[in-house]
Image: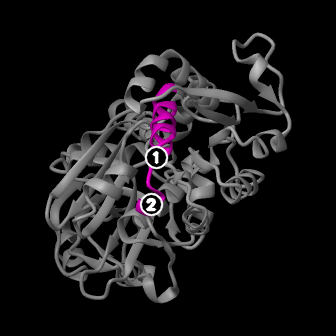
């Protein structure tokens, strides 16, 4: 018999209790012994819950109980989640989590601490909800040099962009609709400004390259400046606008680029077809080529499913097999201004200006003429170069979307 405790009884916490209970026989058969919830930590009482007798308000009860061998942390936020996690690992208890903020900010320290104390720190549920991607990066793709990871990592923003594309609805109206349907929080800042996707990008980059980049240091743009016209143009060109978390490593220098921004995703890229609240993660590696992970990126039971998979693993995991991260230094990271990509640009300019604008940017592809406007795709240029050329183009730029190649 293995005893587990849950920290937090919100959406994911209650879902975890439900999965562990509903699929109890299946889990026992797969693990080889029963897993039972002994405590659920929460500030609230739940008198109508079937788990009401497991509720405790005292963390020390869990910390000091030698029967509890694995704890699932689903509290959200950095503190006290980090402090509780550190104390649990030091006490010789494995911890699994859905808390992307703690993993992205303190992952290097907590993984090392788990290894020191012979226990596990697992976080499949911190990226992609119910999509298995952390474990495949750690195990199934371990024999590959990862070139890049690009992903639609936030269901709220993907729903908004999909609605803008298919219905032509302005951003503000779709956001309000998403909030009414429960797809967006009352305060949607972390989603629409790209902060949620940035934390997940940090975790994916660390899994792919072994270096944890400070989540506050990566370039991060949200979707608040994306217009229905941008979405319509992308669709007319056979692609879509998506908020993309992107990380890559230069094969020559070994430097890592990590960023979040809206991008034009051409139709040939499988991420272009990821719609609604779903997530998709595309991994490019030297041996396997491209591998796509797709599914529900959030939600009570999908995320809980990932939490429970980690609880099951923690009951028999070899701590020595855990990933080893290092905190990235400035020398490990590509300067954003030096990063290079193609761009989809729209200018307030007449059709006669097409040739001069194309020459100004060193060439142009997919040139489109609309009344009073020109759009085209530039060759690959650095961030510094594209900004300088837009500023000296002689016509006002209406929009710019990086192209995901």
Q: Per the image, is 344 magenta?
A: no
Q: Residues within 10 Å of mark 1 (few under 14, many from 20)?
A: many
Query: In front: mark 1 or mark 2?
Result: 2
Q: Along the horizontal axis of the image, is 208 left or right of 311?
A: left
Work out whether residue 336 can be spotted: yes
Residue 197: where, in percent of width, then height?
Answer: 49, 53
Asked whether the beta carbons under mark 1 and mark 2 sit within 8 Å of each other, the answer is no
Q: Earlier in the sequence, mark 1 or mark 2?
A: 1
Q: Secondary structure at mark 1?
A: helix
Does residue 122 sit above or below 278 in this rendering? below
Give the residue at mark 1. 124
Give the residue at mark 2. 322
Q: Nearer the viewer, residue 401 or 70?
A: 70
Q: Per the image, is 309 magenta?
A: yes
Mark 1–mark 2 distance (CA, rounded to whole Å): 13 Å
Dominant secondary structure (helix, strand or loop) of the stretch shown in magenta? helix
Does residue 367 sit above or below 151 in this rendering? below
Residue 401: where, in percent of width, then height?
Answer: 35, 61
Write the start and end of the magenta stretch as one range: 301-322
Q: Residues within 10 Å of mark 2 (few under 14, many from 20)?
A: some
Q: Along the horizontal axis of the image, is 266 left or right of 322?
A: left
């Amino acid at each position: 018999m293995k005893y587990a405790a849950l920290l937090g009884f919100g959406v994911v916490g209650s879902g975890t209790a439900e999965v562990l209970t509903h699929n109890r026989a299946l889990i026992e058969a797969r693990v080889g012994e029963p897993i039972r919830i002994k405590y659920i930590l929460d500030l609230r009482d739940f008198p109508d819950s079937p788990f009401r007798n497991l509720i405790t308000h005292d963390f020390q009860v869990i910390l000091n109980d030698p029967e509890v061998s694995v704890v699932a942390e689903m509290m959200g936020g950095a503190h006290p989640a980090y402090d509780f996690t550190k104390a649990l690992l030091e006490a010789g208890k494995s911890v699994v989590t859905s808390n992307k903020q703690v993993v992205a900010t303190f992952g290097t320290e907590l993984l090392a601490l788990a290894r020191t104390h012979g226990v596990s720190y697992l976080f499949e549920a911190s990226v992609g909800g119910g999509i298995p991607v952390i474990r495949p990066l750690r195990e199934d793709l371990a024999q590959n040099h990862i070139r890049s990871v690009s992903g639609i990592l936030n269901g709220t923003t993907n729903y908004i962009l999909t609605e803008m594309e298919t219905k032509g609805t302005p951003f503000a109206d779709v956001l309000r609709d998403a909030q009414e349907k429960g797809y967006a929080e009352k305060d949607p800042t972390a989603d629409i400004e790209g902060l949620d996707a940035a934390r997940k990008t940090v975790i994916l980059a660390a899994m792919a390259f072994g270096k944890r980049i400070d989540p506050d240091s990566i370039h991060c743009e949200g979707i608040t400046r994306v217009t229905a016209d941008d979405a319509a143009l992308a669709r007319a060109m056979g692609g879509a606008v998506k908020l993309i978390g992107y990380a890559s490593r230069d094969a020559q220098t070994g430097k890592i680029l990590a960023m979040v921004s809206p991008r034009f995703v051409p139709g040939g890229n499988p991420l272009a077809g990821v719609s609604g609240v779903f997530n998709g993660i595309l991994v490019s590696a030297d041996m396997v080529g491209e591998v796509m992970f797709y599914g529900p990126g959030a939600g009570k039971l999908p995320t809980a499913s990932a939490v429970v998979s980690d609880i099951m693993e923690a009951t028999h995991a070899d701590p020595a097999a855990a990933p080893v991260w290092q905190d990235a230094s400035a020398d490990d990271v590509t300067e954003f201004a030096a990063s290079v990509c193609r761009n989809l640009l729209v200018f307030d300019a007449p059709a006669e200006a097409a040739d001069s604008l194309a020459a100004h940017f060193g060439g142009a592809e997919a040139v489109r003429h609309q009344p009073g406007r020109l759009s085209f795709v530039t060759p690959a240029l650095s961030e510094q170069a594209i900004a300088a050329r837009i500023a000296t183009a002689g016509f006002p730029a209406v929009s710019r979307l990086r192209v995901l190649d």
